[in-house]
Image (cartoon, rainbow, N blue to C red):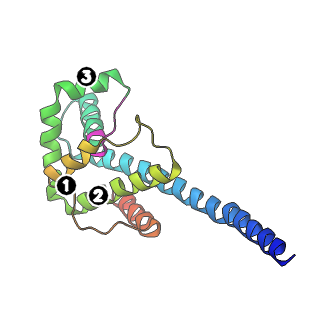
Amino acid sequence: MNYILIAIGTIMFLFLYWLFIHNKKQKLLKEINALVVLTKIKIYEEFEKTIQNNNNKETAFLAGAMTNSLFGEKTDNENAKQFLEEHRAEVDHELSKIKNNKELCKIITQAYKMNIIARTNLRTSTEENVPDPVSLEKLKRLGIWIDGLESPSPKTFILMAQEYYKKV
């Protein structure tokens, strides 16, 4: 009889754990994922401000290509794809300037890490939306990736991201 009660208690504990803790974790991961997306938007906006170009449409495409390239994301927009093919050297040149902005390098490094963590744990990773592994190598080659930087906790990433949003 005691074994049955222990088994029932264990099953109830596991169910309650899954119900409360697992759901809390999923909610936090979704929040982090949303913050990563918002961080990418803010990075895009920062690029858009710093690019010295008279053509607004071209500036928007260049800022978008830079942001997508940093995070290894592909676009479905045919115009954006064509722009990237025609302006790859300009995109890479603009990206090479980022290494001088250590604060931005830190934000990009931490957002990249949190993006992988959130997508992996939310199981939203598919071949289409997983960052291209080449993008990590590109970040390192361009001097943007900060080696040895401790991965942020969800709380520290949220605080860091919110601080960055205020500045941009």
Question: Where is residue 124 drawn, in percent x and y?
Answer: 50, 44
Q: Which residue is mark 1?
A: 144
- Lower position in the chain sequence, tag 1 or tag 3: 3
Magenta span of residues: 68-75
Q: Give the residue drawn at x 80%, y 68%.
A: 8
When the figure is inspected, residue 80 is found, relative to residue 39, above or below; the finding is above
Question: So how many labels did they put on this image?
Answer: 3
Work out whether residue 50 or residue 124 is closer to the camera in this orientation and state it: 124
Q: Nearer the viewer, mark 3 or mark 2?
A: 2
Q: Quadrant of the C terminus?
A: bottom left
Instruction: Identify the disc placed on residue 58.
Output: none
Q: Quadrant of residue 110?
A: bottom left
Q: Give the residue drawn at x 35%, y 61%.
A: 164
Number of residues whose C-alpha sits closer than 10 Å to that of mark 3, classed few (under 14), some (14–19) or many (20 or more): few
Q: Quadrant of the N terminus?
A: bottom right
Question: Where is residue 94 drawn, in percent x and y?
Answer: 15, 43
Q: Which residue is mark 3?
A: 82
Visible residue check, residue 142? no
Q: Amino acid at mark 1?
A: Ile
Residue farthest toward the right in the current orientation of the protein: 1
Q: Amino acid at mark 3?
A: Gln
Dot 1 and dot 2 residues touching (CB under 8 Å):
yes
Dot 3 and dot 2 residues touching (CB under 8 Å):
no
Q: Amino acid at mark 2?
A: Thr
Residue farthest toward the bottom in the current orientation of the protein: 2
Element under disc 2: helix
Question: Where is residue 142 drawn, in percent x and y?
Answer: 14, 50
Give the Cα distance between marks 1 and 3: 25 Å
Q: Which residue is mark 2?
A: 109
